[in-house]
Amino acid sequence: MKLCFSIDALSPSGAHAWRLQKDQTWRECTYAEPLEDGDACITDKKTAEEWSGRRLTKDMSQVLIPQKKAGTFDFLMRGIFAHAVLHRNSSAPLPDKRQMLECIAVLKPGTPWLVYLNVSGHFAALDTSTVSIISNLDIAVRGEIASSGDYIGARAARDDKMMDELYRQFLGGWLDHLNSSNMNVFVPDAEKLKDEADYVEAIRNWSHE
């Protein structure tokens, strides 16, 4: 599976977008469109994370100039911001429910865990008290932060009804991630879920660039 990130800047309204080029200039684009010759294709996650969330301004010639990385609440303000967009040139894996259960079962209650899918479609968890979620490009799809034994740990993993629903939520989020190329996608609300078979079919039929 081959992956890389483009850096797409989006206007406040979302009506205009620009993509970083190999020579550090920008071209107008449609947000998250397929890669073209000349587009910067970043394979180093840390480099992409340094770009993600940076504010950009236009100079007198309307050229985009990168500024410092946005703060926690800067996204509440209007402006042009850079986003890391994931591009795949191979089919996407189907997340494994058994692996999700194993991931959740070993988590110790009392810690604010975030269970997520990484870009390879594998379930993982991070301690949100020590690891930042913002601009974390290891996170393709994320659930809710949980610390209670009702939601994480061995007892929660044995709740078949809840785990079935959670798995469908992650399948829905994974499909959204594949279709949008966005990172840090939230799982859909439970009341909006489709049947598991519908998600499985759509993921298997998804076409890469």
Image (cartoon, rainbow, N blue to C red):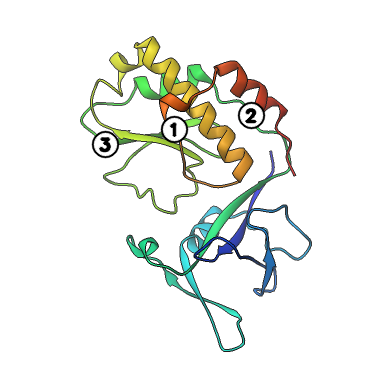
Q: Secondary structure at mark 2?
A: loop
Kindly indicate the quadrant of the structure image that contains residue 35: bottom right
> What element does badge 1 sit on?
strand
Q: Is residue 91 left or right of residue 194?
A: right
Which is more toward the observer, 143 or 23?
143
Residue type at tag 2:
Pro
Whether residue 120 is visible here, answered yes or no, is no
Q: What residue is rendered at 57% in x and 40% in y?
A: 177
Task: From this view, report whether residue 95 is shown above or below residue 51.
Answer: above
Reading the chain from its start, which is encountered first: label 1 or label 3? 3
Residue pictured at 73% horizontal, 40% vertical: 208
Which residue extends farthest bottom?
A: 60
Residue matched to label 1: 124
Q: Are marks 3 and 2 in contact (CB under 8 Å)?
A: no
Q: Alpha carbon of mark 2 to alpha carbon of mark 1: how far?
A: 15 Å
In percent of width and height, residue 65 lies at: 54, 78
Q: Quadrant of residue 206?
A: top right
Image quarter of the C terminus: top right
Q: Which mark is residue 93?
A: 2
SS of the residue at dot 3? loop
Q: Dot 3 corresponds to which residue?
A: 112
Among numbered discs 3 and 2, the one appearing first in the sequence: 2
Give the mark toward the camera: 2 or 1: 2
